[in-house]
Image (spheres, rainbow, N blue to C red):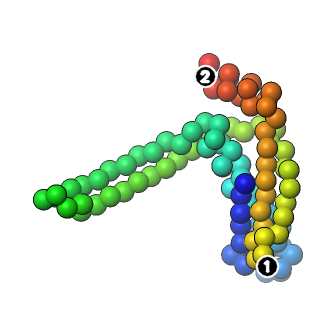
Amino acid sequence: MGYASISAQPAKSVNQRRLMAIRSARLQAMRNLTEQVHGVQIDSQTTIIDAIVQNDSLRASVDGVILGAKTVRINPVGRDTYEVVLELDQALLSNIMRTVRG
């Protein structure tokens, strides 16, 4: 699933903002699928001085290819948000996993 706000989009017309929100929500849903299939790389660093946390940083990244994702539904949520739901075919997902694992 992915979500995006209509009002946050930079287009001038409401219709353009709606289309951009749908596109943005779809890309977010693709990122979420990629995280599920390929996992998330986490880089973390914490600095502690005198038993007190001075700095705590966390960075997450995902990298992968998703092919064949099907749009299940596109729904408005409230007045200002779109939700996009995607799915992967189970056979296709198994094929992707075999390819990734070599």
| Residue 1 vs residue 101, the one in the foreground | 1
Instruction: Bin the neighbour count of mark 1 within 10 Å (Cα to Cα): few under 14, some 14-19, many 20 and up.
Output: few
* Callout 1 amino acid: Arg
Classify mark 2: helix, strand or loop: helix
Which x, y percent locates residue 53? Answer: 24, 60
52 displayed left or right of 101: left
Is 77 situated above or below 59?
A: below
- The reply, left or right, for residue 72 in relation to residue 32 is right
Q: Position of residue 87 (x, y in %)?
A: 79, 44
At label 2, the amino acid type is: Arg
- Residue 22 in sight in this render: yes
For the C terminus, which image quadrant?
Answer: top right
Q: Residue at x 12, y 59 (%)?
A: 50
Q: Quadrant of the N terminus?
A: bottom right
Q: Secondary structure at mark 1?
A: loop
Give the quarter of the image for residue 22. bottom right
User: Is 67 displayed left or right of 38 in the figure?
Assistant: right
| In front: label 2 or label 1 | 1
Residue lying farthest to the left in this orientation: 50
Does residue 64 appear in this view?
A: no
Determine which residue is flagged by label 1. Answer: 79
**Residue found 71% across the figure and 63% down from its top:** 3
Q: Tell me the crowding category of disc 2: few under 14, some 14 to 19, or many 20 or more residues within 10 angstroms, Cα based.
A: few
Q: Is residue 14 left or right of residue 57?
A: right
Residue at 69% over, 75% down: 8
Q: Which residue is mark 2?
A: 101
Q: CA distance from mark 2 to mark 1?
A: 43 Å
